[in-house]
Every structure is written in structure tokens, then in C-alpha cells.
Image (spheres, rainbow, N blue to C red):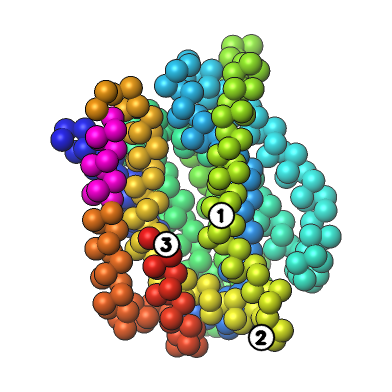
Amino acid sequence: MNILKKLAGQTAIYGLSSIIGRLLNYLLVPLYTRIFLTEEYGIVVELYTYTAFFLVILTYGMETSFFRFATKENLNKVYQTSNFIILTTTSIFLFLSIFFSKKIANFLNYNENHEYIIFFICIISIDVFTSITFAKLRYENKAVKFALIKSTNIAMSIFLNIFFLILCPKILENNHNSFIKYFYFGNLGVAYIFISNLIASIFTLVLLAPEIFKNFIFKIFNKKNEIDFKLLKKILIYSSPLLIAGTAGTINEMIDRILLKNLLEENIMSAIGIYGANYKLAILMTLFIQTFRFAAEPFFFSEAKNKNSKKLYSEVMTYFIIFGLFIFLIINLYIDFFQNFIGEEFREGIKIGKFILRNLF
């Protein structure tokens, strides 16, 4: 029971940052669905869908592999080795993607807005590179530090969205000569959502910089690195099935929004926008599963040697299902209330939210 309380406490801390932070972040959806047209919001939905794919592919199961080997090998060796391969592959992705950004934009039918692609390439690269450092904080049970940095990232993103989408237009409306005109251009539209995310990701990298420099960069330059290529081979072998499973899971969860663009013949981006907005109605279930996973991964590995681990895992699963069913019932019973979460133009797809909620759980 004490172990379960520890897991619950860890989940609560991760949940505090994730649920409150992401709940606030999700509260931007009512803003987006009341400012932008359905087809404009469709752009946001589509590009963030591709982001989810690349985050899974470019991390290729390294977070879970990190927990697996950190329990058996020297922590610093595992951290440096994992960070080294992630930095290498992310740098290659960043360089090649920016070099071919215009061709990628043309392929996705964003010929006149290839800057969208550059924004997302940078966002993905930063998020992937910081993933191992976040995993290290979770392994070391630094849940508070983890929560603070994640919360700061979300708070920064929310502030910048409100600043660009609400405050800047009002300030310029009242004062045409305001200094804001030098960095705010009203015709960028949804690009301000991407810019806000990018700035927040850069700020997160800055917050993690002391940890990265202390345990990775400085040690490499001081020839105190512990990068182990034999260990790297083991890590990659272990993470390969995780990459396949993660990619399959992401395809199962996200491919619908990509397929819509190829299946529909008219009002394509509008339909994607409506679909994506209603998908957000499953927010509580999504947050519950995510916050549990943050605490559960390092917990399961740390308890693997416990002779009662199977019984413990069974009890954890029982409580997980109970809480999940409770959230499922609340949203379904009060769907008329939750539909106010999105703008009126988007509510014609309300049945989508119910269907997705059932599939998530």
C-alpha cells in the first residue's frame, strides 16, 4: 500500500503540471475555434498530427530504454549515450528537413506558407532533444522540477497565444503607432500559434540547459564522457520493438486526421478543423492516461525485481480502470455541457467526441 501511495503521489505531482497546465493549454481551443475559421483551424490540426508522428519516430523508444538500462548500468553512462544518439539523429533531421522545407511544404499543399514547416521542424527537434533529459528527471524522482519546467513551457505558450491573438490586435487598434507593429503582423493568422509554441520550446531548452551542460556537454569537452557504443547497441536493440509499437500506436490514434485530407473531396480543411476540435472533448481521458504514464514507466521498472511485482501491477491496473471509467461516464453523461468547450461552428461534429472517447479507453 505504501508503494501504491508513492505511485499515486508521483502521479499527482506529474498530474498537477500536466493536467492543470494542459487543461489551460486546451482552454486555448475555445479561443482558436472562436477566432479562426474551421478551415484555418484545420491547418493547426493537420500539422500537429504530423508532429506527433515525428516525435515518436525521432525518439524511437529511447525514453523507455533509458529507464530500462538506468536500473542496470551507470546512470551517467546511460544518459550520455542516449543523449548522444538522440542529438545525432535530431541534428540530421533538422538539417535535411530545413534544406528540403519548400519541397515538404509543396507536398503538403502549403506552397505559400513553407515557414509553417520550418516552425514545426524546429519545435520537433527541440522537443526530441530534451526528451532524454526529462526522462532523467523522472528517473531521479525529481517530479517537482519536472513539473515546474513543463508548467512553465505551457504557461509561456498560453501567454504568447493570448498576447499575439488577443492583446496585440487590441493594442494596435487603439494605438496604430505602438512599438508592437514592429514584430506583430496581423496577416500571419494561425502562424502565431506555431510561433508561440516554438518560443516556449526554446525557453524550455534554456531551463534544461544547466542539466544538459553539466551532465553531457561539459563532460564531453572535458574528455570525461562515458558514451559507450556497446551499450548503445544494446539500447537500440531494446528500443527497436518500442519504435514499431509506438509508431503503430500513433498511426492508430492519429492517422484519421491525415486520411481525411485524402478521402474528402470538398471543404477538406474545414472538415479536419471540425474533427480536430471535437477530438479535444476527450481531454480529461487523454490527460489521465498521460499523467499516469509519466509516473508509471519509471515506477514499473524500479519495482520489476520485487517478488510481489505481478500482484502490485495487477492492483495498479485495477485502480487505473476504475478511475478511467469514472472519467468516461462523467463526460458522456454531461456531453451537453462539455460541447460548450468549442465554438458553435464546430459543434456539428459533436458525435465524433463521444466515439473517440470510447476508443481512447
| Foreground tag (2 vs 3) | 3
Question: Dot 3, crowdedness within 10 Å: few (<14), some or many (≥20)?
Answer: few
Span highlighted in magenta in the image = 309-320
Q: Is residue 192 above or below residue 119?
A: below
What residue sits right under mark 2 in the picture?
267
Q: Is residue 22 above or below residue 31?
A: above
Report the quarter where the N terminus lies.
Answer: top left
Q: Position of residue 107 (x, y in %)?
A: 80, 65
What residue sits right under mark 3 in the picture?
360
Instruction: Kindly tell me whether residue 176 is visible in this rendering.
Output: no
Q: Look at the magenta stretch and give its main secondary structure.
A: helix
Which three-letter amino acid code belongs to the residue tagged 2? Asn
Q: CA distance from mark 2 to mark 3?
A: 27 Å
Which three-letter amino acid code belongs to the residue tagged 3? Leu
The label number, if any, that marks residue 250 in the structure image = 1
The answer to whether residue 302 is magenta is: no
Q: CA distance from mark 2 to mark 1?
A: 25 Å
Total marks shown come to 3
| Foreground tag (2 vs 1) | 1
Q: 127 or 209, which lies in front?
A: 127
- First in sequence, mark 1 or 3: give its number: 1
The label number, if any, that marks residue 357 in the structure image = none
Q: 245 or 295, which lies in front?
A: 245
